[in-house]
Image (cartoon, coloured by chain):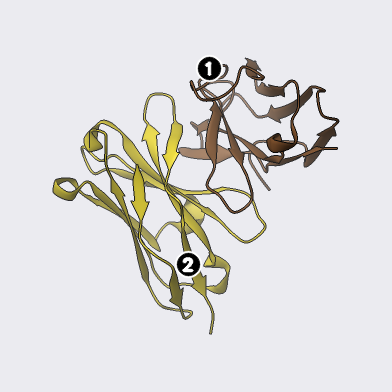
């Protein structure tokens, strides 16, 4: 059971937009920055969004992030088949004194 | 860049040490976090080490079995896991931790630790 809650899967057609939610509490998302990680099977995770809504320079602007209260959202527009991966949200939890992750969301581009 | 040591195959009750050598940045400016991923499962935080001061935090479920250390002259971090069990079988990743934002970036390629009798 993960501390942060994500939907197990999302899907959409190429060119469409999808959003992935991440729900937490005041001790984690409500108090700390959220980072989103993309993991293609067989590879290490990489950052696609950091500090809630910032994109690394190598990540296309199709990827966006937002945070409100104790929830965060990752948006991916103009879906491409190459976007298929698992996505994880992560942050710090002040009560647990640990990094916490969501259970991961599998993105399928139909 | 973070370069990790190679695959380890261990028996239940053994110990394992995984290394993580950092390059191309100031080692003591960032922490090092360890995350593991069991086959087909999600990401599980193991712990982190403050590379400047050496203080650590560990996941509650691994307290007492895991120790994180670092060697600043060689820019290398280490994870030791003792009393291995079959459910410790996982890929163990090290990642650079930005302490103020808790961003994990970049990640090492991972080290497979397989525990089997």
Q: Which residue: 72% across, 36% down? A: A6
Q: Which residue: 69% across, 29% down? A: A22
Q: Position of residue A68 (x, y in %)?
A: 66, 14
Residue A54, numbered circle: 1
Residue identified by numbered label 2: B113
Chain for colour yellow = B
Element marked by disc 2:
strand
Instruction: Identify which residue, A41 or A49, lies in the foreground.
Output: A41
Report the Cα–Cα distance between label 1 and label 2: 34 Å
Instruction: Identify which residue, B55 or A57, lies in the foreground.
Output: A57
Compared across the picture, whether A51 is left or right of B52 comes to: right
Which hue is chain A drawn in? Answer: brown
Tell whether label 2 touches label 1 (CB within 8 Å).
no
Q: Note whether residue A69 is visible.
A: no
What is the chain letter for disc 2?
A: B
Q: Position of residue A100 (x, y in %)?
A: 55, 39
Relative to B70, residue B26 above or below: above
């Amino acid at each position: 059971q993960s501390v942060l809650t994500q939907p197990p899967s999302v899907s959409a057609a190429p060119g469409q937009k999808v959003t992935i939610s991440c729900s937490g509490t005041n001790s984690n998302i409500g108090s700390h920055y959220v980072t989103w990680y993309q993991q293609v099977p067989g590879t290490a995770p990489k950052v696609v969004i950091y500090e809630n809504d910032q994109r690394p320079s190598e990540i296309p602007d199709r990827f966006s992030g937002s945070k409100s209260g104790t929830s965060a959202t990752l948006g991916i527009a103009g879906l491409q088949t190459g976007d298929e991966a698992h996505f994880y949200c992560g942050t710090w939890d002040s009560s647990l004194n640990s990094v916490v992750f969501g259970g991961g969301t599998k993105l399928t581009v139909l | 860049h973070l370069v990790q040591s190679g695959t380890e195959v261990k028996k239940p009750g053994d110990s394992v040490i995984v290394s993580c050598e950092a390059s191309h940045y100031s080692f003591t400016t960032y922490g090092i976090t360890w995350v593991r991923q069991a086959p087909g499962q999600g990401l599980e935080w193991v712990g982190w080490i403050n590379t400047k001061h050496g203080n650590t935090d560990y996941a509650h479920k691994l307290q007492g079995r895991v120790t994180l250390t670092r060697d600043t002259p060689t820019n290398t971090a280490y994870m030791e896991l003792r009393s291995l069990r079959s459910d410790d079988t996982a890929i163990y990743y090290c990642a650079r931790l930005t302490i103020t934002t808790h961003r994990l970036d970049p990640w090492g390629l991972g080290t497979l630790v397989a525990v089997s009798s």
